[in-house]
């Protein structure tokens, strides 16, 4: 009743999503902004008229109903959808592109102007056109660059590339050359190359089908998103919302040697675990609060720990990082439940080295607000608290 009461004749209708239409609506929308709400939530009630007015403004600028869609989900009525997209707070505004949920949700001002401007930014072409191959020699090699060489812009190959660029626009710089400009690079047909960070690092060529969106996206994502990412105040909640545990290296910012060792061992031992755990590194000085929960301080860094959102488990000794299989076993012990079991009950009786717990924490650790928080709140609450203390 509340939602209907907020609708005014002549206004753009917000598409209500349910399990029967959500896939069809989102898959056919270039960009969709979805409001996940609960009617009992005061903030959800406040957002309804703002969201509708922003939709009206955007529709005037982008009248194609498949180019931009404003939609909403009643999370009380459709808890299965809320669970599918890990919605734990209301209202939550999620951005989708061609049916794929973007990892960065909308966290800007809840105002008509701010929401409309956010959508305008999403409509900006993420691909910069190259008019001379000389431009390739002046690229910023401190960034990850992907370049597509195409015979023509109006082609299935380029349309796939453009969709991938839209999805990964925050992670890579995308460029494209067409026609005569790209001809010398198209000796075997249209192609895409990745230029990694660093002047002397060799290019990597995409060898898959240029019209296969899933393959092209998977390849580009692997290149654009680092295996080990930095957790910051700005992306902490976003990383938490991915819903998988963290393997974190806490290190002094200037200690790049420890970070390089960690990156090397993650790539060597844990590449098969990508997708089941997030590999992260954090500045010890900024993230003092999580360290306190494992009874560590910046003076103890570098420290490796797993944050399961229920508890934090410490890797016994950073010096053991390069021991073959040691880091991998630490992660496998998380998945098997061994770390959680030993956290509460002490070492497994079958351990060959009693008293040396993998992921050992202080015995009888003090109960803390960190352990009481809901999973989606845990990390961000800690980050926010750290920022306030700073």
Image: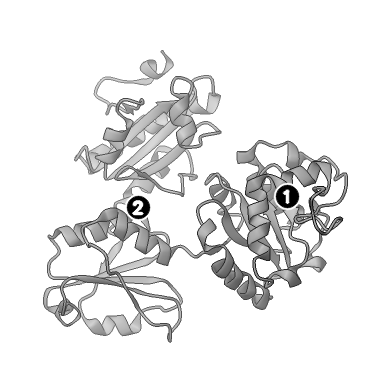
Residue 313 sits above or below residue 31 on the image? below
Residue 194, quarter of the rendered image: bottom left
Q: Which x, y percent locates residue 109?
A: 49, 42
Q: Which x, y percent locates residue 315?
A: 74, 60
From the viewer's side, name the closer residue of 292 and 51.
Answer: 292
Q: Secondary structure at mark 2?
A: helix
Residue 389 visible to an observer of this rendering: no
From the viewer's side, name the closer residue of 219 and 152.
Answer: 219
Residue 185 visible to an observer of this rendering: yes
Q: Which x, y percent locates residue 147?
A: 29, 72
Q: Is residue 294 left or right of 184 when viewed as pictured?
A: right
Residue 233 sits above or below residue 228 on the image? above
Residue 175, quarter of the rendered image: bottom left
Q: How many residues crowd mark 2 within 10 Å: few (<14), some (14–19), many (20+)?
A: few
Label number found at residue 312? 1
Q: Is residue 229 left or right of 143 when viewed as pictured?
A: right
Q: Which x, y percent locates residue 274?
A: 51, 57
| Residue at screen point 42% across, 63% down | 222
Q: How is the image coloured?
A: one colour
């Amino acid at each position: 009743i509340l939602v209907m009461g907020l609708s005014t004749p002549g206004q753009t209708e917000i598409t209500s999503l349910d399990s029967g239409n959500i896939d069809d609506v989102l898959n056919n929308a270039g960009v969709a902004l979805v409001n996940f709400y609960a009617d009992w939530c005061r903030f959800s009630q406040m957002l309804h008229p703002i969201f509708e007015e922003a939709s009206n403004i955007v529709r005037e600028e982008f009248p194609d109903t498949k180019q931009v869609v404003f939609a909403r989900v009643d999370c009380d009525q459709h808890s299965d959808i809320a669970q599918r997209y890990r919605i734990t707070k209301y209202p939550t505004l999620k951005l989708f592109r061609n049916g794929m949920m973007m990892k960065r949700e909308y966290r800007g001002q809840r105002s008509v102007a701010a929401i409309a401007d956010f959508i305008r930014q999403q409509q900006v072409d993420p691909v910069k056109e190259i008019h001379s191959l000389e431009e390739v020699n002046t690229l910023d090699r401190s960034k990850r660059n992907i370049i597509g060489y195409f015979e023509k812009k109006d082609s299935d190959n380029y349309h796939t590339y453009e969709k991938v660029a839209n999805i990964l626009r925050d992670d890579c710089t995308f460029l494209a050359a067409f026609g005569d400009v790209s001809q010398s690079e198209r000796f075997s047909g249209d192609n895409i190359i990745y230029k990694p960070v660093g002047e002397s690092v060799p290019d990597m060529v995409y060898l898959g089908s240029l019209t296969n969106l899933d393959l092209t996206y998977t390849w580009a994502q692997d290149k654009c998103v680092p295996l080990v990412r930095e957790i910051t105040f700005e992306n902490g909640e976003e990383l938490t919302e991915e819903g998988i545990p963290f393997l974190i290296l806490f290190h002094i910012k200037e200690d790049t040697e420890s970070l390089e060792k960690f990156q090397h061992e993650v790539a060597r031992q844990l590449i098969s675990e990508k997708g089941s755990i997030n590999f992260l590194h954090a500045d010890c000085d900024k993230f003092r609060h999580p360290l306190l929960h494992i009874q560590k301080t910046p003076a103890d860094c570098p420290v490796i720990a797993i944050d399961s959102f229920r508890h934090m488990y410490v890797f016994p000794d950073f010096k053991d990082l390069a021991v073959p299989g040691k880091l991998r076993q630490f992660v496998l012990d998380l998945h098997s439940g061994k770390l959680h079991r030993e956290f509460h009950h002490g070492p497994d009786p079958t351990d060959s080295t009693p008293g040396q717990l993998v992921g050992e924490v202080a015995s009888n650790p003090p109960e803390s607000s960190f352990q009481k928080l809901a999973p989606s709140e845990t990390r961000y609450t800690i980050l926010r608290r750290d920022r306030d203390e700073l």
